[in-house]
Image (cartoon, grey):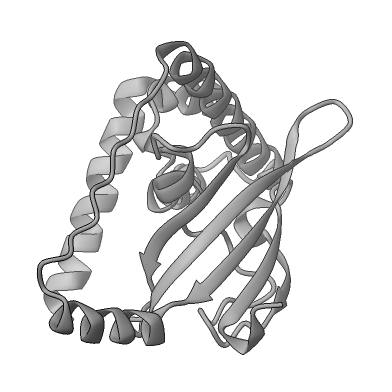
Amino acid sequence: MFGPNCEVIIHDLTTPESSVTYTFNNHVTGRKVGQSFDHLIKKVLLSNDFKDDYLAGYEFQTADNKTIKASTILIRSDDLKVIGALCINYDVNLLLDLKTMIDTLLPNIHANKHTSHDMTNQEENIGNVEEITDQLIDQIISNRGNRLVKRQEKMEVISFMDEKGIFLMKGAVDKVATKLNISKVTVYSYLDEIKKANKKVSTNS
């Protein structure tokens, strides 16, 4: 319907670390089957506009500096657990160039946006987001099976969760600590060690 600049991706969130199961027009973002989700938590679940299991019209930048307008809708099973996501990504760079030209010709036109949020809906949405995050934590850990015995194995799964934004969610550290049978202090210690290692790699490169 929207041509070659529109990409469709389907995620299987029962396998969070390799959630991409289908792509179409994947030249838009370069996403490949077998990769993990990128924006689900940081851009979608943490957005004030996320409600009723979907978020429409959010933006992100690709590694090659394309501006993408995206929409994500979650997919639930019969027992209402989140098991997947449908993502539609549109490359809007040509439209942005056109907008720049129009803004140059009409410099005094400004769009005013007014948003309002009902407090009851916000509270319900927070509960929904926490439930989804809990499911992701459970799925990530359970998919590792018995491979979470050694310290390094636990650090790897914590590093993945940190990269995907899990620990931006309230109470996530406590939940992960309980699931991994370690203390909250240990989780923070691992996160600190991971950040120092990433900073060292960044500095050396």
Residue 124 visible within the image:
yes
Residue in the image at 60% along x and 78% along y: 6
User: In the orientation shown, which residue stands out farthest toward the right?
Assistant: 78
**As displayed, is residue 190 above or below residue 64?**
above
In the visual, does 148 lie left or right of 119?
right
Between 196 and 42, the residue placed more toward the observer is 42
Residue in the image at 17% along x and 65% along y: 109
User: Residue 13 location, x and y as percent?
Assistant: 69, 48
Residue 155 visible within the image:
no
Between 170 and 104, the residue placed more toward the observer is 104
Between 151 and 36, the residue placed more toward the observer is 36
**As displayed, is residue 40 above or below residue 180?**
below
Residue in the image at 52% along x and 74% along y: 90
In the visual, does 39 lie left or right of 17?
left
User: Residue 177 location, x and y as percent?
Assistant: 46, 24
Residue in the image at 49% along x and 37% along y: 50
User: In the orientation shown, which residue stands out farthest toward the top?
Assistant: 120
User: Residue 51 location, x and y as percent?
Assistant: 55, 32
Q: Quadrant of the N terminus?
A: bottom right
User: Residue 149 location, x and y as percent?
Assistant: 57, 39
Q: Quadrant of the C terminus?
A: bottom left
Count of labels in the image = 0
Between 105 and 42, the residue placed more toward the observer is 105
